[in-house]
Image: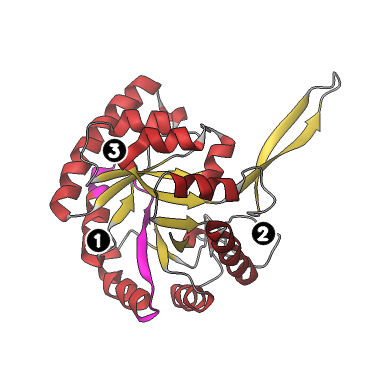
Amino acid sequence: MRFSVFTASTPEWTPAEAVRKLAEQGYDGVEWRVTDQDDAPQPGFWAGNRATWPLTGLEADLPEIARLTREAGLEFSGIGGYARSFERDDVARLLAATATLGAGRVRVTMPLLRTGHYRDLFEGARKDLEWATALAGEHGVTVLVELHHETIAASASSALRLVDGLDPAAIGVIHDLGNLVIEGHEDHRAAFELLGPYLQHVHVKNVAWQPVATADDGTVTWAHDWATLRAGQADVGAYLRALREAGYDGWVTLEDFSTAVPLEERTRDNLAYVRALAGA
């Protein structure tokens, strides 16, 4: 397995700082966040993230993205795009940019459940993915569908329904350990077997559910929050063993959104932790 970091989780670093620090710590690659984001008084994961490349004007930034990545000695594990499957112009731009960079693969996000009736959303996304897969094939890159809570593809089973029958050389699935703690968990071994050739990328983060309120009748309300790799509910070691037993030897991208540990210490410790687990 090769390890990278998704720069959504490194908001305090500029792109130059991100690749320098990740290379120094021993990472194999970087997964760049690409989206037009809101400004923020302080750098945050989703707004004001300094390690994010804007989608607007992306083409002009491609030489700098390539230079920074390669001069640091890192590979592209992929491009973390945020274009929805139905935003075809933006998807086309991301596919072309991924091909230009030689980054191999790019995430295309799925419709949110709250935006319509599930069957309608699913049918529309399937048509969009058929179109995107054909275009990805022309570019020689791969579209990635991430297992993500509150979307139409929260589980391996639902993602397989979306991509089944499409060319696995041009479309695949990101299996995301942390997201599945929130919604969509299935037995990992079964999920890997189910996805087969569509299992093409992995994201690792962790999540914990916490009680946040108790009603007068004793009913407890729970909420999920990001946790360190060690402290969350997912067993990272068991997950990596299951991946290895399934024959997966691709990218494992870390995206730790916990904040209990300072960023540079967090990324360094996470790499040591997963490498030790993967080799155990």
Q: Is residue 91 above or below residue 75?
A: above
Q: Can you give x and y, in whole percent of width and height, for residue 68 in the image?
A: 37, 77
Lower sequence index among marks 3 and 2: 3
Could you say which disc has been placed on residue 270 in the image?
none
Foreground label between 3 and 2:
2
Q: Which secondary structure, mark 3? A: loop
Could you say which disc has been placed on residue 259 in the image?
2
Which residue position is annotated with label 3? 86
Membership of 81 in magenta stretch:
yes
Mark 1 and mark 3: span between their CA atoms? 18 Å
Q: Can you give x and y, in whole percent of width and height, for residue 209 in the image?
A: 69, 38
> Where does the magenta region start and end?
71-91
For the residues labelled 3 and 2, say whether their Cβ atoms are less than 8 Å apart: no
Q: Which secondary structure, mark 1? A: helix
Q: Which secondary structure, mark 2? A: loop
| Count of residue discs | 3
Q: Which amino acid does label 2 sit on?
A: Thr
Q: Which amino acid does label 3 sit on?
A: Phe
Residue sitting nearer the eye, 61 or 101: 101
Mark 1 and mark 2: span between their CA atoms? 32 Å
Q: Which residue lies furthest to the bottom in this view?
A: 71
Which residue position is annotated with label 1? 97
Q: Is residue 223 above or below residue 57?
A: above
Lower sequence index among marks 1 and 2: 1
Q: In this view, does 142 lie above or below 124?
A: below
- In the rendered view of the protein, which quadrant contains the N terminus? bottom left
